[in-house]
């Protein structure tokens, strides 16, 4: 248990650190939302100064940080200048869509990478393995942006898949099954783009980890005892390769979150990406900080899940903290 | 081919690609900002060797491609007007690497020649891709240099001095690693001015990209410094009274060269991609300065995506460079492993 508590404390301290960092960077920013307003002749100087006072943009950073951090603990992420509503509800709907996308992509990419990686590690250096390596190398050298745009061009020209967005026109009137099918068909394109960009790196690592486990002397011995291939694979190879693979899980979430920002903008998926971009262009301070913090939360949570898995899968870690 | 030859071939090819982009003005037939309002969204012209009568020509030629009357984006080849490709023609002035003024271009024709088509302002896409490469690659190279310098300094300081300095520096590095890195890039960019002139924007992008990625190299450098400072020859030098700065410079930092080179081969394409992403989203290098990212920005419009497929071609310009850097990185990594094994085998 100590291991998990330590990891949890670590995750929380990371989040606090990131929030301080984000706030620090925000004070470096020249100007704020209200400076842009000053150019608007319809807003008087008095109105502007009262707005500035209301939102306390002129107070020192430490004061604003403490007030904001206190609000965050109550689930309030601050106020959006541009939308004139609290940030939290705005962010949550977008975050839900981003989670849907990256969650599906994470699941799909692992479901592809694991069997393919094991398959090619078993045939290390043979034609099948070499072919697969070349195929993934091709995916690796095409930039993510080109990949996403290429898929979009393909979808638009063929008309097989919806060319972006998350739902069709008239979504509210669909039946539940129809709604699910509609969202799923809109997800195919962005998920494919994400999977294609994350798969090559992941596949290489899985292949390397499994290949290393296959080389281990204990496995040779188990093979010599005549244990069947399937049992060998599931009972001995995968547990032995579990540690590096689980560490990779956290890494893959980070990659997919980063990748999804771009894919969301390209495919106009209503997630955090387009929302954050819009907020940056409008200098909507608290939305930017909230979005960055939320993405960190996802990543940190993903890493914590990886830690949980590690604790469950690797007896050495449990042995480090005896008697709890 | 031995590993060394392979490395040399790879570096030579990659170098040739970069020189090609540095001499963009020579390979590009036109000025990247020159507009031809008579030719908006002209498709790529076809290079011919056989004319309409079936005669074979050794010198390739184009047919003039005027707009169809009454249309604004449909072009038709005029087979009565052939124009042979001319080589080493004199054209728009340009500067190689910003210093050497020249006028000679590799090829051209009597009428405008658009090998990759034109954009909505009638600007030659080939010229824009080549000049855009200068911007994007330069951003990647300088950004990587900046990141590695920061990483080297922080890593060396943390590893060499240790104690609370190490603790603080590594905690900060962890913060930078905790953020999904494109979000981090966005966050840093978000708090810098938005509307700035192209050159300043370019420098801004380079600094942002360079400042964001230092944590990983810093950790690696720290690890090497930590192990290197306990080596016998370093202890011996310390025993002879060598100062800390001398030890770092003479004995410890040379050990990090391999890792830094490998990291550079990994970081440059990643940073070029970062520049492309920022410029694509309108947060990077603005028009009219071309970059591989903002050349693709027009694809965000549905009608461009549907009607003018050649506008997608700049997306593929990066591919040979990615390939080169990927091979380089894997060769360097393999080389580092081989070197280690060799060193262990020979016995010190």
Image (cartoon, coloured by chain):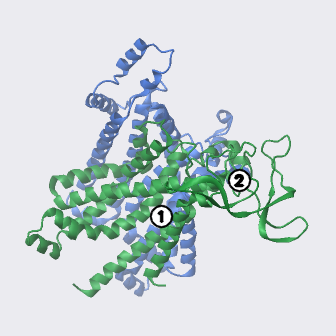
CB atoms of marks 2 and 1 within 8 Å: no
Task: Using the image as rendered, state which of residue A185 and residue B210 is in the foreground.
Answer: B210
Residue A33 position by quadrant: top left
- Residue at image x 44%, y 58%? B141
- Residue B305, above or below A77: below
For the N terminus of chain A, give its image quadrant.
bottom left
Task: Using the image as rendered, state which of residue B229 and residue A257 is in the foreground.
Answer: B229
Q: CA distance from mark 2 to mark 1?
A: 35 Å
For label 2, the SS is loop
For the C terminus of chain A, give its image quadrant.
bottom left
Chain displayed in green: B
For label 1, the SS is helix
- Residue at image x 31%, y 37%? A24
- Residue A313, above or below A26: below
Label 1 belongs to which residue?
A201
Q: Is residue B271 visible?
A: no
Task: Using the image as rendered, state which of residue A258 and residue B85 is in the foreground.
Answer: B85
Q: Is residue B37 visible?
A: yes
- How crowded pointer 1 is (Cα within 10 Å; few <14, some 14-19, many 20+) is rated as some
Residue B188 position by quadrant: top left
- Residue B248 picture location, percent across and down: 20, 65
Q: Which mark is residue B117?
A: 2
Tint of chain A: blue
């Amino acid at each position: 248990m100590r291991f998990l508590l330590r990891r949890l404390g670590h995750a929380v301290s990371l989040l606090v650190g990131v929030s301080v960092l984000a706030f620090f960077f925000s004070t470096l920013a020249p100007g704020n939302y209200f400076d842009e307003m000053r150019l608007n002749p319809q807003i008087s100087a008095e109105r502007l100064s009262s707005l500035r006072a209301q939102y306390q943009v002129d107070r020192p950073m430490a004061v604003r940080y403490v007030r904001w951090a206190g609000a965050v603990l109550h689930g309030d992420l601050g106020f959006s200048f541009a939308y004139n509503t609290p940030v939290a509800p705005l962010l949550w709907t977008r975050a839900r869509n981003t989670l849907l996308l990256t969650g599906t992509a994470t699941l799909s990419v692992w479901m592809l990478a694991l069997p393919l990686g094991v398959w090619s590690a078993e045939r290390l250096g043979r034609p099948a393995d070499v072919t697969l390596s070349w195929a993934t190398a091709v995916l690796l050298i095409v930039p993510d942006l080109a990949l996403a745009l290429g898929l979009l061009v393909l979808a638009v020209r063929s008309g097989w898949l919806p060319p972006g967005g998350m739902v069709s026109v008239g979504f509210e009137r669909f039946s539940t099954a129809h709604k699910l099918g509609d969202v799923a068909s809109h997800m195919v394109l962005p998920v494919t783009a994400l999977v294609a960009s994350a798969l090559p790196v992941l596949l290489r690592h899985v292949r390397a980890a499994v290949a290393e486990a296959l080389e281990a002397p204990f496995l040779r011995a188990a093979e010599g005892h005549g244990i069947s291939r399937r049992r060998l694979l599931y009972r001995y190879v995968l547990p032995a390769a579990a540690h590096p693979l689980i560490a990779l899980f956290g890494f893959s979430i980070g990659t997919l979150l980063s990748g999804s920002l771009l894919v969301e903008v390209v495919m106009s998926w209503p997630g955090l990406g387009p929302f954050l971009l819009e907020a940056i262009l409008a200098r909507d301070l608290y939305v930017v900080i909230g979005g960055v913090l939320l993405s960190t939360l996802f990543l940190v949570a993903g890493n914590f899940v990886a830690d949980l898995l590690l604790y469950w899968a690797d007896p050495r870690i449990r042995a480090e903290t005896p008697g709890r | 081919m031995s590993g060394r030859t392979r490395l040399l071939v790879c570096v030579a090819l990659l170098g040739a690609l970069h020189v090609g982009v540095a001499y963009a003005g020579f390979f590009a037939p036109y000025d990247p900002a020159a507009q031809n309002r008579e030719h908006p969204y002209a498709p790529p012209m076809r290079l011919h060797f056989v004319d309409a009568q079936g005669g074979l020509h050794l010198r390739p030629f184009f047919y003039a491609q005027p707009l169809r009357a009454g249309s604004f984006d449909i072009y038709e080849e005029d087979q009565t007007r052939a124009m042979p490709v001319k080589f080493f023609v004199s054209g728009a002035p340009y500067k190689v690497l910003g210093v050497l003024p020249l006028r000679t271009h590799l090829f051209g024709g009597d009428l405008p020649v658009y090998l990759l088509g034109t954009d909505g302002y009638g600007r030659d896409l080939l010229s824009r891709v080549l000049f855009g490469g200068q911007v994007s690659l330069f951003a990647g190279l300088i950004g990587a240099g900046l990141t590695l310098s920061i990483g080297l300094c922080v890593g060396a300081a943390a590893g060499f001095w240790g104690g609370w300095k190490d603790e603080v520096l590594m905690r900060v590095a962890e913060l930078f690693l905790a953020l999904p890195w494109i979000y981090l890039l966005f966050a840093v960019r978000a708090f810098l001015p938005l509307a700035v002139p192209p050159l300043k924007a370019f420098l801004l992008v380079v600094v942002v990209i360079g400042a964001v990625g230092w944590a990983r190299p810093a950790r690696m450098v720290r690890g090497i410094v930590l192990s290197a400072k306990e080596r016998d020859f370093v202890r011996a030098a310390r025993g002879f009274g060598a100062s800390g700065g001398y030890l770092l410079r003479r004995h410890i930092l040379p050990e990090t060269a391999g890792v830094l080179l490998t990291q550079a081969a990994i970081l440059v394409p990643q940073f070029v991609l970062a520049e492309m992403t920022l410029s694509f989203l309108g947060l990077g290098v603005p028009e009219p300065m071309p970059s591989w990212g903002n050349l693709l920005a027009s694809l965000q419009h549905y009608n461009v995506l549907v009607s003018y497929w050649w506008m997608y071609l700049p997306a593929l310009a990066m591919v040979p460079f990615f390939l080169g850097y990927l091979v380089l990185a894997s060769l360097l990594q393999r080389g580092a492993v081989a070197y280690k094994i060799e060193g262990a085998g020979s016995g010190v």
